[in-house]
């Protein structure tokens, strides 16, 4: 099995592309979104619930991005370690960040 040291970065790139596409869709349909989610509310409870839902979604998305950035750092350290093994270096930890799991 081949080790892929860019797996997390590719997922992050897909997330960025999806966020850009979503942003474009929101901008295009902003009048509908404003009418449906803001202007048609009878009470403030709907706005509070919609805001809380959006906040939870964004918090989850930030957690996913932080996790993927952490995994990308670990993948880079593992790639350096594997490269050191392949190059038959004496010190396998050269260039490996001491804060990573493999160190």
Image (cartoon, rainbow, N blue to C red):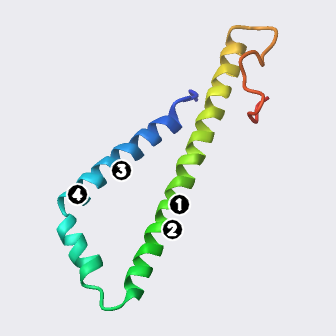
Q: Earlier in the sequence, mark 2 or mark 4?
A: 4
Callout 1: helix, strand or loop? helix
Cα distance between the residues tagged 1 and 3? 14 Å
Cα distance between the residues tagged 2 and 4? 21 Å
In the drawing, what numbered circle is on residue 27?
Answer: 4
Q: Are marks 2 and 1 in contact (CB under 8 Å)?
A: yes
**Residue 45 in the image, given as x and y percentages of width and height:** 41, 87
The residue that appears at 43% across and 68% down in the rendered structure is 54
Label 1: how many residues lie within 10 Å, few (<14), some (14-19) or many (20+)? few
Q: Earlier in the sequence, mark 1 or mark 3?
A: 3
Residue of label 2: 56
Cα distance between the residues tagged 3 and 4? 12 Å
Callout 4: helix, strand or loop? helix
Label 4: how many residues lie within 10 Å, few (<14), some (14-19) or many (20+)? few
Cα distance between the residues tagged 4 and 1? 22 Å
In the drawing, what numbered circle is on residue 60?
Answer: 1
Figure check: 13 above or below 22: above
Q: Earlier in the sequence, mark 3 or mark 2?
A: 3
In front of the other: 81 or 25: 25
Q: Earlier in the sequence, mark 4 or mark 1?
A: 4
Figure check: 73 above or below 95: below
In the drawing, what numbered circle is on residue 19?
Answer: 3
**Residue 5 in the image, given as x and y percentages of width and height:** 56, 29
Please identify, in this view, whether the residue under mark 3 or under mark 4 is nearer the observer. Answer: 4
In the drawing, what numbered circle is on residue 13?
Answer: none
């Amino acid at each position: 099995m081949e080790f892929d040291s860019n797996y997390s970065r590719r997922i992050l790139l897909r997330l960025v592309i999806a966020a850009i596409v979503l942003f474009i869709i929101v901008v295009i349909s902003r009048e509908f979104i404003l009418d449906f989610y803001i202007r048609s509310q009878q009470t403030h409870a709907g706005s509070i619930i919609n805001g809380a839902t959006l906040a939870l979604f964004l918090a989850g998305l930030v957690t996913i991005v932080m996790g993927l950035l952490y995994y990308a750092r670990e993948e880079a350290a593992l790639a350096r370690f594997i490269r050191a093994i392949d190059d038959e270096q004496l010190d396998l930890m050269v260039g490996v960040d001491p804060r990573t799991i493999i160190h």
